[in-house]
């Protein structure tokens, strides 16, 4: 992850009640009312846009080909190494 990319620890922050930031409950998503609370939905969208999805995916939602070509193939894959088993 580059220094300019948002990390998973930079979650949307605080839902009005209870304060979840810094607790184990913040990992699954502190904004549980995104379907019914427009403020939560906006907060979630702002957080997710920091990952710059337009740089990762095509307008149709597929992984950009230049990124899909990055992982090693054949014997260079991590799963092909006997040291990973």
Image (cartoon, rainbow, N blue to C red):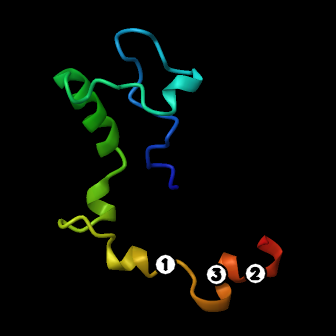
Within 10 angstroms of label 2, few (less than 14), some, or many (20 or more) residues? Answer: few
Query: Are the two marked residues, 1 and 2, in contact with CB atoms closer than 8 angstroms?
Result: no
Query: Are the two marked residues, 3 and 2, in contact with CB atoms closer than 8 angstroms?
Result: yes
Q: Quadrant of residue 74?
A: bottom right
Q: Could you tell me which residue is drawn at 26 percent across and 24 percent down?
A: 40
Select label 1 or label 2 by which is in front.
2
In the visual, does 62 lie left or right of 76?
Answer: left
Q: Could you tell me which residue is drawn at 48 percent across and 17 percent down?
A: 20
Q: Position of residue 60 (x, y in %)?
A: 18, 67
Select label 3 or label 1 by which is in front.
3
Q: Looking at this rendering, what residue extends furthest in the top direction?
A: 17
Q: Looking at the image, which is closer to me, 68 or 3?
A: 68
Q: Secondary structure at mark 2?
A: loop
In the visual, does 76 lie left or right of 13?
Answer: right
In the image, residue 16 above or below residue 62: above
Q: Looking at the image, which is closer to me, 44 or 82?
A: 82
In the visual, does 30 lie left or right of 24?
Answer: left
Which residue does the numbered mark 2 point to in the structure image?
81
Q: Quadrant of the C terminus?
A: bottom right
Per the rendering, the mark at residue 70 is 1
In the image, residue 69 above or below residue 41: below
Q: Quadrant of residue 69?
A: bottom left
Q: Secondary structure at mark 3?
A: loop
Q: Quadrant of residue 66?
A: bottom left
In the visual, does 25 lie left or right of 82?
Answer: left
Query: Are the two marked residues, 3 and 1, in contact with CB atoms closer than 8 angstroms?
Result: no
Which residue does the numbered mark 3 point to in the structure image?
77
Q: Looking at this rendering, what residue extends furthest in the right direction?
A: 83
Within 10 angstroms of label 3, few (less than 14), some, or many (20 or more) residues? Answer: few
Within 10 angstroms of label 1, few (less than 14), some, or many (20 or more) residues? Answer: few
Q: Earlier in the sequence, mark 3 or mark 1?
A: 1
């Amino acid at each position: 992850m580059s220094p300019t990319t948002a990390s998973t620890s930079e979650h949307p922050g605080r839902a009005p009640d209870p304060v979840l930031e810094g607790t184990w409950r913040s990992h699954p998503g502190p904004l549980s009312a995104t379907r019914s609370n427009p403020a939560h939905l906006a907060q979630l969208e702002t957080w997710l846009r920091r990952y710059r999805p337009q740089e990762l995916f095509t307008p149709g939602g597929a992984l950009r080909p230049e990124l899909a070509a990055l992982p090693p193939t054949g014997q260079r894959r991590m799963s092909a190494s006997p040291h990973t088993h």
